[in-house]
Amino acid sequence: MPYSINARKTPLSIALLLTISLFFQSCSEPADKFFGVAVLNTNTINDFGTSTLAKHISDETLEFPDIPSSKKKGDEAVTSVNNNVLYMEKSLKDIEALSASDDSRKGIKEKAIALYKFVIPVYKNEYTAYARLCDNKAPQAQKDEILNAVEQKYSAEFESRYAELLAKGKIFAEQNNIPVDWK
């Protein structure tokens, strides 16, 4: 008896779909790794738009007269901001490389990518300009002008994006039994 294509296709296609499904599930990162890369790494940018970040950048230029090793070359603040940008760009690439095998992961991945794409240009422009002023020992009024502009233009949007990502991250952590201290 000749086989019809449809008669053979059904059991074979089910087996093939199961195999492909298992393959893609096995290619997904474990939940805790996905969570660490997409959600926890954002801890490095959670001070965006705050006086804490401004102080950290400014502190890169501090010198202490009685400590010769604290003598600065004059580019420390800009170097610090540039290093932060490099780390954020690496984090963004790591997030983009994550597999998003379900809607929850897709949502988190999209929010994390959008957050980094929102923050990186501000670091490259406004925070680099602020760091340059810090390195050049510019008047505080000039530095405050940049910080106030960042706060007015970007802080509310950042807080909203960050809160959305964390909300999705909390649900993901609970669903995957990932212990997180959300202090």
Image: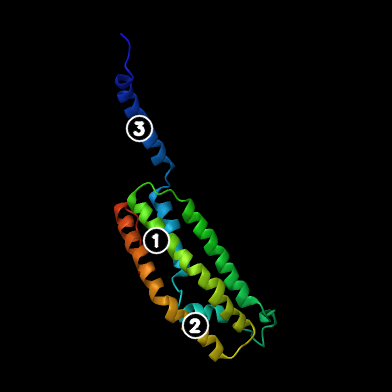
Badge number at residue 126:
none
Judge left or right: residue 33 versus residue 84: left
Q: Which amino acid does label 1 sit on?
A: Lys
Judge left or right: residue 46 versus residue 181: right
- Where residue 132 sits in the image (x, y, percent)? 61, 80
Tag 1: Cα neighbours inside 10 Å, few (<14), some, or many (≥20)?
A: many
Q: Quadrant of the C terminus?
A: bottom left
Q: How far apart are marks 2 and 3 (CA)?
A: 54 Å
Of the pair 151 and 32, the residue shown nearer to us: 151
- Where residue 180 sits in the image (x, y, percent)? 35, 61
Judge left or right: residue 131 versus residue 157: right
Residue beneath disc 3: 17
Q: How far apart are marks 2 and 1 (CA)?
A: 25 Å
Among the two numbered marks 2 and 1 on one chain, the one whose residue lies closer to the N terminus:
1
Badge number at residue 111:
1
Question: Helix, strand or loop at disc 3?
Answer: helix
Q: Residue at x 36, y 56 (%)?
A: 107
Question: Helix, strand or loop at disc 1?
Answer: helix
Among the two numbered marks 1 and 3 on one chain, the one whose residue lies closer to the N terminus:
3
- Where residue 79 sits in the image (x, y, percent)? 62, 72
Q: Which amino acid does label 3 sit on?
A: Leu
Quadrant of residue 179 in the image? bottom left
Of the pair 105 and 117, the residue shown nearer to us: 117
Q: In this view, does 24 lie above or below 106?
A: above
Quadrant of residue 38 in the image? bottom left
Q: Distance between the residues labelled 1 and 3?
A: 30 Å
Colour mode of the rendering: rainbow
Q: Which residue is drawn at 51% across and 87% down?
A: 144
Residue beneath disc 2: 147
Q: Which residue is drawn at 47% across and 82% down?
A: 149
Q: Residue at x 52, y 56 (%)?
A: 93
Q: Is residue 9 above or below residue 149?
A: above
